[in-house]
Image (cartoon, helix red, strand yellow):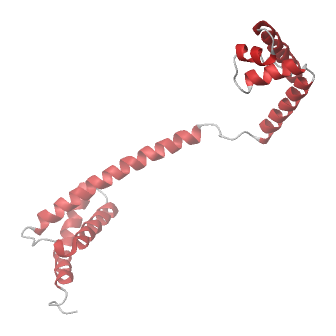
Amino acid sequence: MTSARYPLQQNMASLYGEHHAWLLGWLRKRLGCGHHAADVAQDTFLRLITVGDKLPQLDEPRAFLTTTAKRLLVDRGRRQAVEQAYLAELGLLAEQPPCFPSPEEVLQAVQSLERIAYALEQLSARARDAFLMHFLDGEPHAVIAQRLGVSTRMVHKYLVQALLGCDEAVGQSCL
């Protein structure tokens, strides 16, 4: 490599050689940790390299390096704040009970549904239809009454009859 062909590399090598140790010491004092200081110093020079040919002539290289390093420290602080918030949310999620039911809970639910299905089969067709229209389709009593050709009072009786049958089948209060 000749200096005439690669002036950017020569300038960066010179800048790095003359000021890296100083920047590392400055960052170590600010951060209190040699490892973090080394990371930020390396990121500072990397930032300058990515600017490439657009890098201006540096009359005060240390001032330029400290400004760049300070901006990187601000960016690092923001990233750490986001990371801490994310980790806190993960911690809250981990403390919550599992989102999925256990196999025992699934079995219990299936058995209860089977008992309810059997209880509904024992009802009259109108009581069963009223129950399904109200609790599965969300239909109000008046609509069910119109569809079944009965009064709303009769729909109410059908629903009570169906709920009592379900309550008895499951063995706990559905009401």
Left or right position of 45 against 57: right
In the image, residue 170 sits, relative to residue 49, either above or below, namely: above
Nearer to us in this view, 112 or 157: 157
In the image, residue 47 sits, relative to residue 130, either above or below, namely: below
Left or right position of 57 against 171: left
Q: Residue furthest left?
A: 59
Left or right position of 74 against 160: left
Residue 118 in the image: state x and y as whole percent: 91, 27
Q: Residue furthest top?
A: 153
Nearer to us in this view, 119 or 57: 119
Residue 153 lies in what quarter of the image?
A: top right
If the image is split into quadrants, where does the C terminus sit? top right
Residue 41 in the image: state x and y as whole percent: 26, 66
Nearer to us in this view, 8 or 144: 144
Left or right position of 168 against 17: right
Q: Residue at x 79, y 42 (%)?
A: 103
Q: Residue at x 42, y 44 (%)?
A: 85
If the image is split into quadrants, where does the N terminus sit? bottom left
Residue 167 in the image: state x and y as whole percent: 84, 18
Q: Residue at x 28, y 56 (%)?
A: 32
Q: Residue furthest right?
A: 122
In the image, residue 102 sits, relative to residue 29, either above or below, namely: above
Residue 114 lies in what quarter of the image?
A: top right
In the image, residue 61 sits, relative to residue 131, either above or below, namely: below
Q: Residue at x 86, y 19 (%)?
A: 126
Report the number of numbered marks: 0
Nearer to us in this view, 26 or 84: 84
Residue 71 lies in what quarter of the image?
A: bottom left
Residue 37 in the image: state x and y as whole percent: 29, 62
